[in-house]
Structures are given as structure tokens and as C-alpha cells.
Amino acid sequence: MKHLIFNLLFLIVAQSLSAQTSPNGKIRAELDDDGDLEIEYKRSGGWEDLFSIDTKAIFASKAKKVEVKYNMLTGKRRHCENAYKESVYTDNRGNKLFTLRVYNDGIAIKGTFGSVDMDDASNHWLMRWTDSYEGFFPKNQTVKPGDRFGYPALFEYCEKNKESVWVLISESNMHSNEAASSIHASTEKDHFDLLPDGTEPGGWQTFIIGKLSDIVESTLISDNSDECQLEGTSWIEPGVASWVYWAYNHGSNDFNIIKKYVDFAAQLKLKYVLIDAEWDTMKDGKTVEDAVKYALDNGVKPMIWYNSSVGWVNGAPTPKYRLNKPEDREKEFAWCEKIGVTGVKVDFFSGDTQMNMEYMIDLMKCAAKHHLVINFHGATIPRGWQRTYPNLMSTEGVYGAEWYNNVPTFTKRAASHNAILPFTRNVIGPMDYTPCAFSNSQHPHITSNAHELALTSLFESGIQHLADKPESFLAQPKEVLDYLSNLPTVWDDTKLLAGYPGEDVVIARRSGKTWYVAGINGTDEEKDIEFDIKPLKWKGTTVTLFLDGTSSNWDIKTLTAKSVGTKLSQQQTKPRGGFVIVLK
């Protein structure tokens, strides 16, 4: 009888503690009788089931509430706040299985658990895994058992006459002794296993949950990551960069071409110039030190490129094997600091293994020691490192404008893809898409000029590399050049005003008292895009509109606040068009 009473009391206590609700009361995680963790979202009509996680847990410890407040040097907003309740879940023998944090805008889970059941989702956007995370996010593609997908993954839950609920799955708080995870389709339909790339443990599997605006505006990936590990950060400066590779499909071994990009950056008052691959084979008797000096003499901060030498090595551009050993990268980064280099771009990693995680973290630490900002290319996605190591300005991990150089595929798919990225890849961290091209590279683009300009503030990146050649930019109207000269890469706030993945999107970002509202049409049809600027609480005086012209490339207007009328609630866009509105 005593054992029976004890077991009954245990079950009562376990059941009472098994439901964990977010501090704001919108998200709930509850164990069912089978030990599955049911994730629910609260609407006006009550709790709605979203997805479940197979855990086999039977008990959850009493939740402790934690407030999260911190400042960022880059990202969607300078000051971030969130809160969560944390519980430890155990099996029937008291063995720890996993830790769960239920945030105001999602959940994070770390430990041992089974597949994730997403079979109630109405639509999904998944990217097939590649080690560089350069792929498309097609809507509702066929999924077969064993298929592997990269983070993030977006799911929509539709219900008649109700606003959709959305879930974005990614990963956060990655450490050097861990392997990054990815998504593997299970044998059971719409079930997915979140598995690390190796025998080492993964990070925190992180689910952002809510309305579409909650997804886009969320900072959950950095909220759930370690605090800044650097002793000082006053030397870290985000900014806009000129970039040679896109126009020439080649590196930076021609000093005269580098000068053109330095001069362009100086004329537009851009902070950086990137001296790309092959600078170690400079022509005409010049060296990279000559290029660095020329940039510094003209008030432009130089960054230089390195091959990580763990991914694409044979046949890849140089310099190689300069960063792999601790003593070699210490020597290299000390030399960079000595000659005046202010940042490095490291390219061609080999995926999500623990070796790559450790290597990338070591690079960030060593770069910070020598006051170098860093940009990863050909690399995995950010997993909260931009908070822990704020000298990380950006990461590629995206099928971006560089692909106009590689294959003709991007020409027809770019507009729709661009209208998906704000809801997927760019949600989780800075994205070096290298936006804005008015001319063509190896393969043409068919997005409009206003669409291209919009990408510069639609996409968030601590360093925003402008893709096009100097002469193409300098041929644009003065208003466009002034816009680029004043373009922020640090934002005080971010808001989604309208949109649906692949169709259109309007995002507003604030720098100081100025709002940048960027919108694009992802379809091949003319489209009226409607949005509401009331959430911005703007009380300014001047409005500048960059629109697609009917008989030319541009229709640029400067209006006073009183004369704006309804012009800000709806914009007519061309096929694959766009607009930018600057509210001062």
C-alpha cells in the first residue's frame, strides 16, 4: 500500500510539473502519457497543438525563471530582452534526459530525445543540406526518409479564418567540443531527427514560435547563447564594404583594380574594402601591403581573404594553410594587425563537424586578440556566435548574389528566393548575401533596380558587401549614392510590416530616429504590396521613396510628412520589383 501511495503521489507531482509555460503565457510544453513533449501555442480560443517531441520523459523539475537582457553590436536590435523558464526532464529512474527552456517566443532543448513530429504543419520550407549552406528553400518539396536538410526550417500551421502560427527550427549556443546538428527525415512521414554531425553532442535545438512577425523579429538564437567572451569590444566597427569578386569573378591580385574599389569606397564614405583571394600573388611588383597602405591612406579599412584549407583546397585560390595551426594563425593575425588590416574573411570550410566548430571558434578568438573583425564564407550558419564573439560581423551560409557568377539557375529564381530569406536564413543571424547589383556579372539578373537597392536594408549583416562594380554604382542618381553612403549596418529595431515567404516582404529597420522600409516583390507579376507603418510610431518630417520607374530605372521622390498621404500604405511594384522608403 505504501508503494502504491508513493507511486500515486509521484505521478501527481510529475504531472503537475510536466507542463511548462513561457513567462508571457503564450507557449506551453506538456508531457503526455506516452512521454512525448507536446508544444502548444495559445490563441484567443485556447491552446492549439503544434508539434511534439518524442522524449520518453516522465518527470520535470520545478521550473526556474530567467531574465535575459544584453546589448549587441550588430543584429536586429542593439538591446535585446527575453525570458524563459527552465526545467530538467528525467526518466522513470531519475536519469537526466534533457534540459528545456520555454521562452516567450519559442523553446530550446538540449540532451537526449527522439524525433520531432511536424505532421500537423500545413506548409514547409526546407533547404537540402550542403556543407556551405548554399541552397534554396522550396515550398513543400517532396521529403523522403533519410533526406538531410540544413537549418533553419520553416513550418506554417494554417487554420480556417485564423492567422497562421509559424515554427522555425534552428540551433543555438554552439561550443567547440560539440558538432553542429542538421535535420534528417525519419522513416515516419513528417517526423524529423535533429542529429549532430558526428559522435559529439550537438548544441541547443531551438524552435522559434508565433506569428510571422514574431519569427522575423526574434532574437532567440542569440538570446539562448553565451554572453560576450571578449574582454573589450570598443574597437569593433560594423559597416559597408566595397567588394571586387562579383564583377570580375576573380580575386584581388590586380593592384589597379583594388585601387578602383578603394577609391569608390572613399568617395561614398564606405567603411571597408575587401581585398579578396589571391592577394598573395599580386601582379606588377605590388604586394598586399601596398594595397593595405593605399586603403588606409584613403581612409578605408582593409579586410583580406584567407582559405581555411579544410574544405575546398585542391584547385582552390590562395593563400592556403596559414591559419590551421595555432602558432601559424597567431603569426598571421599579428602581421595583419601590424600592417593595418582590420578584418579577415575566411572561406571554404568543410561542414558541421566538431572540428569545424572548434576551428571557427579558435579563429574568432585569435582574430579578436589582434583586433580583427571576421566574416566566414563557405561555412555553416551562425548559431548565436554573434553575441558570444561580437567581432563576427557576418557569415555567408546562403545562396546569395555570388551565384550569378556560377550557374544560370539564379537568374529566374532570385526574386522568389530573396523573398524567402527574411523568413528563414536571415532570422537566425547575419547573412553575407552580398546584395545590390545594377549591372550583370557572368549571368544576368532580372530583378529591378529598386529590388536590388532594397536588399541592402532588407537583409541584415554586420558588414554589408556591395556586389556591383564601382562604375555601375557611380552611374546611379545622386540620391542612390547618398543612400549607400548613409546606409547603416547596425539597427536599433526591426519590424516585419507585411509579407509571405516567396511572394513579397516588407521589413522596417530603425537606425537612431530614421526608419528604412524595404520591400520586394518575389513574383513574376505586377503586385500592389500593402503594409502598415503605424507600428513604427514615426513622427518625422521627410520621406524619400526609391521606386521602380515606369519609363526609366528609377522613380525617386522626396516628400514632406504632410504630403505623404496614403503613399506609405501601398506600393505598386513591377514583376520582381521593389522599393525603399527612408523615413527621417
Image: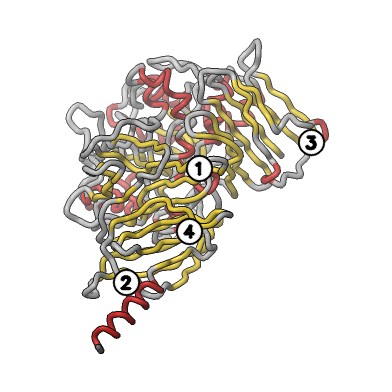
Question: Looking at the image, what colour scheme do you see?
Answer: secondary structure
Q: Position of residue 296 (x, y in %)?
A: 47, 38
How far, Cα to Cα, is label 1 from label 4?
A: 18 Å
Q: Amino acid at mark 2?
A: Phe
Residue beneath label 4, please? 27
Q: Position of residue 75 (x, y in %)?
A: 50, 48
Q: Amino acid at mark 1?
A: Glu
Residue beneath label 2, please? 59
Q: The residue tagged with tag 2: helix, strand or loop? A: strand
Q: For residue 400, which quarter of the picture?
A: top left
- Crowd tier of the residue under label 2, counting other residues whose Cα lies within 10 Å: few below 14, some 14–19, many 20 or above: many
**Considering depth in this image, is 239 or 137 the residue closer to the camera?**
137
Looking at the image, the residue that sits furthest to the top is 551
**Nearer the N terminus, badge 3 or badge 2?**
2
Instruction: Please give left or right for residue 29 compared with residue 452 in the image.
Output: left
- Residues at marks 1 and 4 touching, judged by CB atoms closer than 8 Å: no
How far, Cα to Cα, is label 4 from label 3?
A: 40 Å
Q: The residue tagged with tag 1: helix, strand or loop? A: strand
Instruction: Please give left or right for residue 318 compared with residue 168 in the image.
Output: left
Give the number of the mark in front: 4 or 3. 4
> Which numbered dot is residue 159?
1
Residue beneath label 3, please? 561
**Nearer the N terminus, badge 1 or badge 4?**
4
